[in-house]
Image: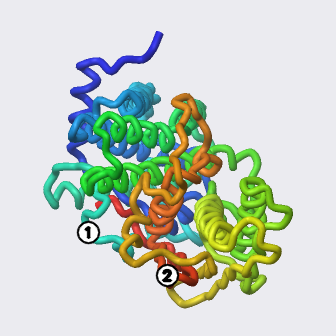
């Protein structure tokens, strides 16, 4: 029997959607998750059991209020139901009954060298976005938003573990909560492609070639919010698992020593393989990597791999299609990595013919593609974020830019029509930028 959104749940979701989301920075996530005790994980569960329903409620409301009949497309309604069902599962999960003593212990911050530690470092405004650009719902005033920020500091803080003798119901709840989040994450694996299918349904029904600015802005907000939701869920599930098998370089899914050269080399190999497979080439265009061997910084490797792979895939495709599949030797694409005080910058330079200046804004438009015919998406397609076949759907660069901006970086493109394109991927190494939700 399929799941249905009932009127009572719809009213609860509407209530939650009025509250603003609370942004968290990469550095805060690492500080918080460095020593995931039972008490600390329970505090994280408390934070997420309040924060995730707010974020999910924003998406349910927005999907239901999309203009021009887009909210009536079957694939859009399907995604809306996924978000509503996930909201219900988190809000109905039974919390344990705790004694006053345990509650007081949970509110005590962890000690650092015998002293009470600072709760967490402050977040800073994300430099890559304008205020409100990706605002995730919420109708409260400034005082309420300040209260939300205080809530983030209160919940996203490690607790004093003492001798570790937490009541067993805390550990049971942590396990159940993590299992619920893992189930939700799997349910939402196919969201990107299902929303893309919904946009295709809309374009066919309305006989539109392109989407307008309001739908473009919605997709930016929706996918940025999705990155944030999956980051919080993935981080929490990984921290819970980390208690039994941990890697000293990882805090959840964040690698404190992300090696840029290794990830760039892997992305180059993957992009060349896909290029050879797609065009039937014996040898794809060569890629030259210039990067210090020991360049490491704190980041989410999965995000960086995705951005590099998408950028390189676009460059190699442009080179092959500009010079022809029968060319014996293609021009080399350069990947140059530079380390600055604020940013690590990766430049991908190709000789793929460039893009006309008038077309550059379209590169950031969802469903814009240079592929002759946009292929059909199987409605039951259900792949993870980084394996979805985005070539031909015009999603590669717009979503990569959102990943870059999520932690305070950016993705920029400069083209020389008739010659080639330079893509600059800026990665913020300071790690204190808040999620762009305000």
Residue 138: percent from left, percent from top: 22, 49
**Dot placed on the residue nearer the N-terminal end, 2 or 1:** 1
- Taking depth in this image into account, of 96 and 93 the one nearest to the observer is 93
Mark 2, residue position: 417
In the visual, does 40 lie left or right of 308?
left
In the visual, does 210 lie left or right of 256?
left
Mark 1, residue position: 131
- Taking depth in this image into account, of 220 and 405 the one nearest to the observer is 220
- Taking depth in this image into account, of 400 and 44 the one nearest to the observer is 400
Q: Residue at x 61, y 47 (%)?
A: 389
Look at the picture and state if 9 lies above or below 139: above
Residue 31: percent from left, percent from top: 54, 65
The answer for how far apart the CA atoms under marks 2 and 1 are is 33 Å
Q: Secondary structure at mark 2?
A: loop
Camera-nearest label, 2 or 1:
2
Q: Residue at x 61, y 39 (%)?
A: 383
Q: Residue at x 53, y 38 (%)?
A: 376
Are the residues flagged by discs 2 and 1 in contact, CB closer than 8 Å? no
Q: Secondary structure at mark 1?
A: loop
């Amino acid at each position: 029997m399929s799941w249905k959104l009932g009127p009572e749940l719809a009213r609860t979701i509407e209530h939650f959607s009025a509250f603003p989301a609370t942004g968290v920075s990469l550095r805060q996530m690492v500080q918080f998750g460095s020593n995931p005790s039972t008490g600390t994980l329970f505090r994280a569960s408390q934070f997420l059991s309040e924060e995730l329903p707010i974020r999910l409620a924003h998406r349910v409301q927005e999907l239901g209020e999309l203009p021009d009949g887009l909210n009536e497309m079957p694939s859009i309604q399907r995604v809306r139901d996924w978000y509503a069902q996930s909201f219900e599962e988190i809000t109905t999960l039974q919390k344990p009954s705790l004694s006053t003593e345990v509650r007081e212990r949970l509110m005590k911050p962890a000690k650092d060298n015998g002293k009470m530690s600072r709760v967490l470092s402050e977040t800073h405004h994300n430099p890559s976005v304008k205020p409100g650009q990706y605002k995730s719902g919420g109708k409260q005033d400034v005082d309420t938003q300040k209260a939300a920020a205080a809530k983030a500091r209160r919940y996203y803080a490690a607790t004093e573990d003492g001798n570790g003798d937490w009541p067993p119901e805390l550990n049971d709840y942590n396990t159940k909560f993590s299992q619920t989040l893992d189930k939700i994450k799997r349910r939402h694996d196919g969201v990107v492609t299902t929303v893309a299918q919904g946009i295709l349904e809309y374009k066919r029904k309305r006989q539109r070639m392109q989407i307008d600015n309001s739908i473009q802005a919605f997709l930016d907000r929706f996918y940025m919010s999705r990155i944030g939701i999956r980051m919080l869920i993935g981080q929490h599930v990984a921290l819970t698992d980390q208690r039994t098998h941990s890697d000293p370089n990882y805090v959840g899914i964040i690698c404190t020593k992300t090696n840029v050269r290794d990830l760039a080399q892997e992305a180059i190999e993957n992009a060349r393989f896909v290029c050879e497979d797609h065009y039937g080439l014996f040898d794809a265009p060569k890629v030259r990597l210039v990067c210090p061997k020991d360049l490491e910084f704190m980041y989410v490797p999965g995000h960086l791999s995705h951005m590099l792979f998408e950028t390189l895939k676009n460059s190699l495709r442009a080179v092959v299609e500009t010079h022809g599949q029968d060319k014996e030797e293609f021009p080399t694409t350069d990947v140059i990595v530079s380390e600055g005080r604020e940013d690590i910058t990766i430049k991908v330079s190709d000789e793929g013919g460039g893009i006309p200046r008038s077309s550059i804004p379209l590169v950031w438009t969802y469903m814009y593609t240079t592929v002759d015919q946009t292929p059909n998406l199987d409605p039951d397609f259900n792949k993870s974020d980084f394996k979805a076949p985005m070539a031909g759907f015009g999603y590669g660069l717009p979503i990569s830019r959102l990943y870059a901006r999520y932690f305070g970086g950016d993705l920029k493109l400069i083209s020389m029509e008739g010659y080639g394109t330079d893509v600059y991927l800026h990665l913020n190494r300071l790690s204190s930028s808040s999620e762009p939700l305000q």
